Amino acid sequence: MFFTIMKTSDIIPFIYIYTFIFALIFLVATTLWKWMLQLDKGLTTRLDRGKVGGKRHVYNDINSLKVLDPMHETVLTFQNMVVQEGAGSWATIPVVLDAQAEDVVNFPSELDMPWKFLQRVYGCTADSGNNTANVLHNFDKNGRWTLWINNGVSENIRSTELGFFRIFYEVEVKALPVYLETIQSIVAYDAGDLKACSRHLCNMSPLLRELFQEFHQGITIDKVSRDLWLRYCQGFQGWGVGSEVAGQYVRYNGLSGNQVLVFHVLDAFLDLPSYLSMEDTIRYIPVRQRYFTSAVRRHSFRSRIGTHSDPAVHKAFACLISQMRLFRAAHRHRVMPYLKVPAPEREYQSYTMTSSVAYTVEDAAYPFTIRGMDWKNYGTYRPMYPSSMWAIWLDYHKRHGGLLHAAHDIGAGSGFSANILSHYFSHVYVSDPGEGNIAAARQLLRPASRFSFAQRPGEARWLQEESVDFASICIAIHWMDAEQVLNNVAASLRPGGTLAICAYSFLVNFPDCHKLETLWAETMRNSVKGFVERGCVGADELKGMRKFLVGLDGTPVNAALYRDISRLQVNMRKDEAMPFCFVPHDFMELPESKVRPNEDVRYMQDEEWRMEVDVPWLKGYLHSSNMPFNDEVWNSGNWKELEHIISHELGGKVVVEWPVAMILATKNVIG
């Protein structure tokens, strides 16, 4: 946390603070009141120009668009002013690691008591404020940034501060006509005027394009310095502390782009799941904005249109959804260089401003290089590679004359597989592109003399030719350029050397209750489809996901480099369609099969890929995917039914079984 708490006696006299605060409150309230009157008048005028007809109830419901109720938001600005104007006494800028040690910041009761009351009245429970209070209301009616975080510093720092926060202001300005077209399309559809509805939907497309450009054109190094952004601007708003609520400690994440109103409204209108849980929505989204979003969601008609009955409307919706997907993927790519800059405040920053996935990666090109990865948690909520797998691999290796001198584990993570390989091979090379992953592997793998570590991706050729006997890639090949990696492996293998690859599916089997398989698959497919549509899966992750969804069938094995190629399909049926595909089968284009007729494809059952688990473990397994499974998923009908069956009909425990794909191949000796 960036606050350095001082003694109460050292703080500026409260009388002075109160005088300053309430003078500013009066000034901001006057400005906002005029603004909101104009906003509401504009909406009412547009909707009353003969467009509403007999469907006035729709507008009456959505009239909750007084989302920036001046008294509500002015009061929320109270905390923002205290934090910013007290920065000289209470805060450290730039943010430093030691300043984040506090879990709780105890404000004086003179400030804390009224603030808690106002939180209850106006419906925002987070102590950190929100995008509306901390940013939008810090601009005056002329668009000037009023209360600066950084004073008496270089112009580069101040221009970065202004450039970054102005993005949010300009986006909300450009969102107003989007709101108008949204409401008018709802009114037109409710009135049965499909032609007008289609026109309003089509009008939204260029408006969204212009709005999205604010992000793309605003987040550039000439406007927002990568070196200064986290340290001097976003880190200050990061908050990262909490308080005790109902006997439990709750941490508040602070300002984030996922609090921007227009994205909530668009998700509601397009009938996409909210990317904030209900709990976080109540914490960070002002109640008036929640009312508006809920009204839009209630009147959303996307689920009621038909491909054939309303082709123009259907096409317009498809265009809007496509725009949202492209923006979120591009935006995630745009902010990644900023998140890669070393800064201690990243500890509490979200991976992306439009995603609820709270992690960062070291290198955007390698999505599995997760910064601060909790490998202990990963090991708890993932299946262990059973002894049967190693027995199959070593039997194949020995039958083809393989030696046991050296092995290479590629994409090793923290070294789970490398540790087992060391039981059979004299020396193990451990490689991974992630600095944190290699550091974790160094801690796990002992004695160090038995291992060689390299922070290298599989696509990099670094081992000497014909230097290892065995190369393994466990649950990682989908993140890689498989063709390049397998070429490198072939070069490094000695004659008779073995390539071994495995991947297990997230579509688990439930041998004792097939009903659970259906509920699990529906939960996965609906949830992941929503994550992709909301942009929670970035371009690089999506690329890897597409490969993973076909198991190892999309992994090509070059017959010129390898022989005796075997593909093992464990715990899968021959007639089973796409046992790895945890999205609707027609949702995205998947890689074509690379399985050749002369390859040996075998189906087998292996009960060692089974584990008895409970509901919390299943949640942990989904969380380990680093996709934003949250309360929205757990409150879905499919998950509730799954949980009921396990908890009440099966005694709280259930056996899960993993479908597993493997590839085994021997280096082809030429000449």
Image (cartoon, helix red, strand yellow):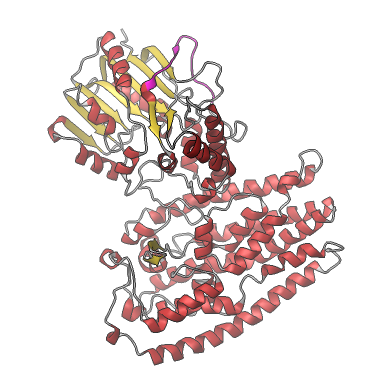
Task: In the rendered view, tell whether residue 477 sits above or below residue 39.
Answer: above
Inspect the magenta stretch and tell me whether residue 214 lies in it: no
Q: Residue at x 50, y 59 (%)?
A: 279
Q: Residue at x 33, y 43 (%)?
A: 377
Image coordinates of residue 104 in percent, x first then y, are 33, 69
Q: Is residue 636 left or right of residue 465?
A: right
143 or 102: nearer the viewer: 102
At x 32%, y 49%, the residue is: 372
Q: Is residue 651 left or right of residue 282?
A: left
Look at the image and say whether residue 596 sits in the magenta stretch.
yes
Q: Residue at x 45, y 63 (%)?
A: 222
Please report the bounds of the magenta region as a residue range.
592-607
- Expressed as whole percent of the image width and height from the top left, the position of residue 118 reads 51, 77
Across and down, in percent, residue 219 comes to 49, 60
The image quadrant that residue 370 belongs to is: top left
Q: Quadrant of residue 499?
A: top left
The answer to whether residue 464 is seen in the rendering is: no
Image quarter of residue 566: top left
Locate the C terminus by quadrant.
Answer: top left
Tell me the chief SS of the magenta region. Answer: loop
Where's the N terminus, which quadrant?
bottom left
* Nearer to me, 452 or 26: 26
Rendered location of residue 519, percent (x, y):
56, 35
Residue 520 vertical placement versus 421 (above, below): below
Residue 628 visible in rendering: yes
